[in-house]
Image (cartoon, coloured by chain):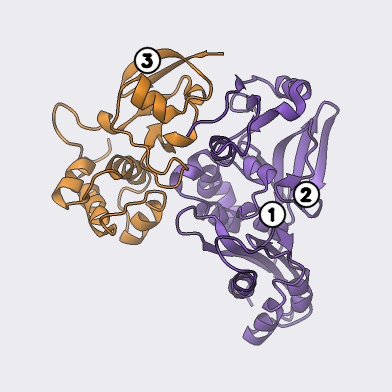
Amino acid sequence: MYPAAFDYHAPGTIKEALDLLGKHKDDAKLLAGGHSLIPMMKLRLAQPKHLIDLRKVPGLSGIKQDGNMLAIGAMTTHWEVESSSVVKSKLAVLSEVAALIGDPAVRNRGTVGGSIAHADPAADYPAAMIALGAEMVCEGAKGRRTVKVDDWFKGLMATAVGEDEILVEVRVPVLPASTGAAYMKFPHPASRFAVVGVAAAVTLDGKGACSKASIGVTGAGTKAVRAKGVEAGCTGKKLDAAAIEAAAQKAADGVDVQADLQGSVEYKSHLCRVFAKRALTEAVKRAGG
Amino acid sequence: MKLPVKMTINGQSYSHEVEPRLLLVHYIRETVGLTGTHVGCDTSQCGACTILMNGQAVKACNFFAVQADGANIMTIEGLAKDGELHPIQQGFWEKHGLQCGFCTPGMIMSAYQMLERYPKPSEELIRHQLEGNLCRCTGYHNIVKAIEWAAEHMPAKK
């Protein structure tokens, strides 16, 4: 399979990339790791006339700590996140999420920014970014702006990034004190995409009750969403097995669960509840509860 | 519009003019003529097309040749030296790590990266690291044994 013909550009600066994007608009697609875009191009689901490869644009990859945030360049690969000593020591759950994406060869090429900007409904990072409260930095001709994760995912493969903007950085807060986080998924056996995946971050107060819960669900619907019912079910409670079970029952509420080749609405809703329970159980354990 | 690409494959340098949509795997197989790298699923799931690019395993069916401009590539043909099999190839021979052999080049290139990153892998780690390589014959057991054999027989790192 090979894609429709296109012109290939490999700009050397962010400005050049933005100029190309501004010039070709809808006819252009940005290429990061290409592990979502190229398969779509091969199936001719995407037929951009211009492909703008970001691989030569400096400053788009790497991970650094910036106060209580990890600033992750958009072109940072999943393997770099998985193997980063900074991520492992400051936000280990993110390294665990990266290690569950696709397979080693996919993780060598696939990028954080590519995943977040492509917004595949079954991708792993979106659930984690929701649970961890990430923010995305977009750059356009007029400069940079920051978008909070709750305003980012707009629909099926649609995000808040402007058509003339490039996602350049993802900023993820490190976990506050007495907080545990975990991501659990049911992977498709061939693609390793999440049939359903749930990320949970739980903060406990001095008495061991949950003061804050943040839950992201991916795979079930057209986009990753925040499971507000589960969050409400956790807050203020001591999260023993029974409380977790009760809260997890709300995991599919408010999710536009879609039937697909992987399963029926009923089945995928069930997986939401099962994996919410598993993610919560592990997050509470890690929070010291 | 064709674009010039230049890359090193198994120590030899190659320059060609290619269409941007030419996939790296087709460049390697059809333009350069190294057919050991296979096309299996053509959807980046099966791993038969795995090669090493700048030391990292890459599924060459999911990558354009123009993206590899300037890269250093190793394919299955680059492993044996002076008629002697590489320890990973020898492991697949010793432990009968293949049946039809179609997935084998990709399995071996993935194993190469695996042993670079994890010189003494557990069975569990081997299985996790092979998630991107599908085999429809063996049930994987002998592939895992072949990689374990290779791990024991790899020359010590300098």
Name the mark on residue A52.
none
Q: CA distance from mark 2 to mark 1?
A: 10 Å
In this image, A141 relative to A282: left or right?
A: right
Q: Nearer the viewer, residue A57 or B45?
A: B45
- Closest to the camera, between mark 3 and mark 1, is 3
| Residue occupying image coordinates x 63% and y 36% | A46
Amino acid type of the residue that numbered disc 3 sits on in the rendered structure = Tyr
User: Looking at the image, is B74 positioned above or below residue B130?
Assistant: above
| Residue occupying image coordinates x 69% and y 54% | A129
Q: Are marks 3 and 1 on the same chain?
A: no
Q: Earlier in the sequence, mark 2 or mark 1?
A: 1
In this image, A14 relative to B55: left or right?
A: right
Tell me the chain of label 2: A
- Closest to the camera, between mark 2 and mark 1, is 2
Name the mark on residue A152.
2
| Residue occupying image coordinates x 63% and y 52% | A125
Q: Tag 1: Cα neighbours inside 10 Å, few (<14), some, or many (≥20)?
A: many
Chain with orange colouring: B
Q: Tag 2: Cα neighbours inside 10 Å, few (<14), some, or many (≥20)?
A: many
In this image, A199 relative to A96: left or right?
A: right
- Report x, y in % for residue B10: 31, 24
Label 1's element?
A: helix
Cβ atoms at labels 3 and 1 below 8 Å apart: no
Find disc 3 in the rendering and name its residue. Answer: B14
Chain with purple colouring: A
How many marks do you count on the picture? 3
Cβ atoms at labels 2 and 1 below 8 Å apart: yes
Q: Are marks 2 and 3 on the same chain?
A: no
- Report x, y in % for residue B147: 26, 50
Q: CA distance from mark 2 to mark 3?
A: 44 Å
- Report x, y in % for residue B148: 24, 53
Find disc 1 in the rendering and name its residue. Answer: A129
